[in-house]
Image (tube, rainbow, N blue to C red):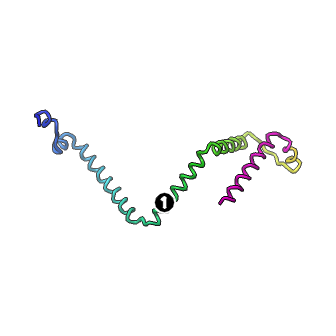
Amino acid sequence: MSDDAAASESTPTDAIAEDPEAVAAFVRRLDDVNELLDVMALATEAADDEMVSSVAGTAASLGELADEAADPETISGARTLLRALGDAGDPGTTYRGVGIVGLLRALRDPEVKRGLAFLVALARGIGRELDRE
């Protein structure tokens, strides 16, 4: 080993002498790491096969749900519902009671017709999914 290489290598004693606060902080972090390892060891010992299977099943279900939520048709439908909810929830809008005659009049409105068609399609999809389960 050359003299330059030997001179550039520092020993633990040199590191402590150069920056004792950094070494003390490092030691405190090691205590935290050791505590975390102890907790993980306890959790590992406490976990039984049934718990592991349950967690794995939950993770798989969440994965399936995420796949469904990422579907472009699901995103489009959710966006439509959320925008409509935002419009309906406008604090500046005053709603009056609607009776049977008012409902029948509303059925002539093209927007109401399209909205009802959307709700009927939603109800049909819910029914289809209930049949699958």
Residue 114: image x %, image y %? 78, 42
Residue at left 10%, top 34%? 3
Residue 40, quarter of the rendered image: bottom left
Residue 58: image x %, image y %? 52, 58
What secondary structure characterizes most of the magenta part? helix
The correct choice, above or below, for 37 with respect to 22 in the image is: below
The correct choice, above or below, for 37 with respect to 116 in the image is: below
The quarter of the picture where the C terminus appears is bottom right
Residue 41, quarter of the rendered image: bottom left
Q: Inspect the image, locate mark 1, and give the three-letter code of the amino acid beneath it.
A: Val
Residue 53: image x %, image y %? 48, 63
Residue at left 77%, top 44%? 115
The correct choice, above or below, for 76 with respect to 28 in the image is: above
| 132 part of magenta stretch | yes
Furthest-front residue in this view: 132
Residue at left 67%, top 44%? 77
Residue 51 in the figure: left or right of residue 68: left
Q: Which residue is mark 1?
A: 55
| 124 part of magenta stretch | yes
Residue 12: image x %, image y %? 18, 45
Residue at left 66%, top 42%? 76
State the extent of the magenta-drawn residues as a range. 106-133
24 or 2, which lies in front? 2
103 or 60, which lies in front? 60
129 or 24, which lies in front? 129
The quarter of the picture where the N terminus appears is top left
